[in-house]
Image (cartoon, helix red, strand yellow):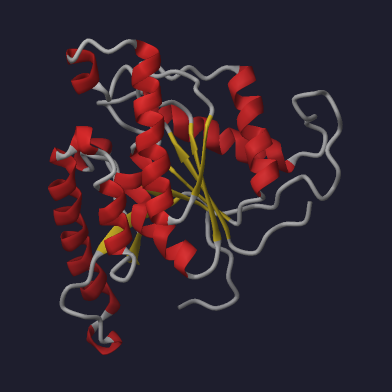
Amino acid sequence: MPQIDGSLLVVSAHAGDFVWRAGGAIAAAVERGERATVVCLSYGERGESASQWLQGKPLEEIKQIRRAEAEAAAAALGAEVEFLDLGDYPLVETPEALARLVEVFRRVQPTVVLTHPLADPYNGDHPAAARMALQARVLAQAIGVPHADGSVPTKDEIIGAPPVFFFEPHQSEQCDFKPNVLLDITEAFPRKRAAMECLPAQKHMWSYYTDLAVRRGVQVKRNAGPNLGLPHETMGEAYVRYYPEVTGVLA
C-alpha cells in the first residue's frame, strides 16, 4: 500500500464540523488533484441535531438524516467520507475506537491531517476527537502496533509523519485559538458554500462562516503583503500547525 501523493485526512468529531471548519481546505486540495478523505467519528445525533429531536424523530432516523447531509456536503467538496458511529455527547475515547481510527490512517496514508484543537470548553467531543487523531497518527507509524485483526502491518502500511493542523473552533477566543497558518480559499469558497447549504438544520451557520471567511481573507491579504496581488474579495481559513515544520530554507 504505497503512500499516495497529496492525501488529506480530516478527522471530524461530528457530521458537520468538517464543513464549517475545513471545507475550503478540502475543496482546494481536491481542486489540486489530491485525494481528500473525511472521517466523522459520530453523526452529532445527540448534541447537534436539536431540530430533529424537537420534531420527535427517533435516534436512528436522526443518524440517517445527518449521514445523508454529510455525504451530500462531502460530495459538494469532492471528498470521500466515512463514519465510525462512535456516538456523541459524549464522544468516548476507547481502545476499540482508537484501533478503528488507526486503521483509517493506515489505509488512507495521509500526507496532511486536519482536526479539532485540543481545547474547547463548550464541547468536549472536539478535543476528544483531536486527542484520538493525534494518538492514531502515532500508533499508525509503529510497525509493532498490530491491525485490529491482530496481524502485523507491513512496512508499506505504516504511515509517515504527516503534519497536523488544527482548524478553527466556533468560539476561537474561548478556546485560546491563535492561528499561525492562514489559508487562501478564494477559489475553493463556492464549493465550501455549496457544502454548507447541504446542512439545512444549521442554516444559521451559513452566514457566520461566510463572514468568518471574509475576515480571515482580510488577514490573508495583510500577512501576504501588497506584492502578492490577491483579489479584494479574498476568502480565508485559519489553522494552527501542531508539529514543527522541517525545512532547509527559512521563508
Q: Is residue 11 visible?
A: yes
Q: How many marks?
A: 0
Q: Residue 22, percent across and down? A: 36, 51
Q: Is any part of residue 116 visible from this angle? A: no
Q: Is residue 114 above or below residue 225?
A: above
Image check: 18 left or right of 164? left
Horizontal relation, residue 61 to residue 40: left or right: left
Residue beneath the point at 61% across and 35% down: 136
Q: Position of residue 171 (x, y in %)?
A: 20, 39
The quarter holding residue 8 reads: bottom right
Q: Quadrant of residue 123?
A: top left
Q: Position of residue 62 (x, y in %)?
A: 34, 20
Image quarter hosting the C terminus: bottom left
Q: Residue at position x 28%, y 62% from top?
A: 189
Q: Is residue 90 left or right of residue 97?
A: left
Q: Is residue 237 above or below residue 206?
A: below
Rendered residue at 36%/12% (across/down)? 59
- Res. 226 image quadrant: bottom left
Q: Residue at (39%, 19%) from the top-left corner?
A: 88
Report whether 225 appears left or right of 239: left
> Where is residue 240 shown, x and y percent of the image?
38, 52
Front in this rendered view, residue 186 or 113:
186
Q: Is residue 110 above or below residue 136?
A: below
Of residues 206 and 218, the one nearer the viewer is 206
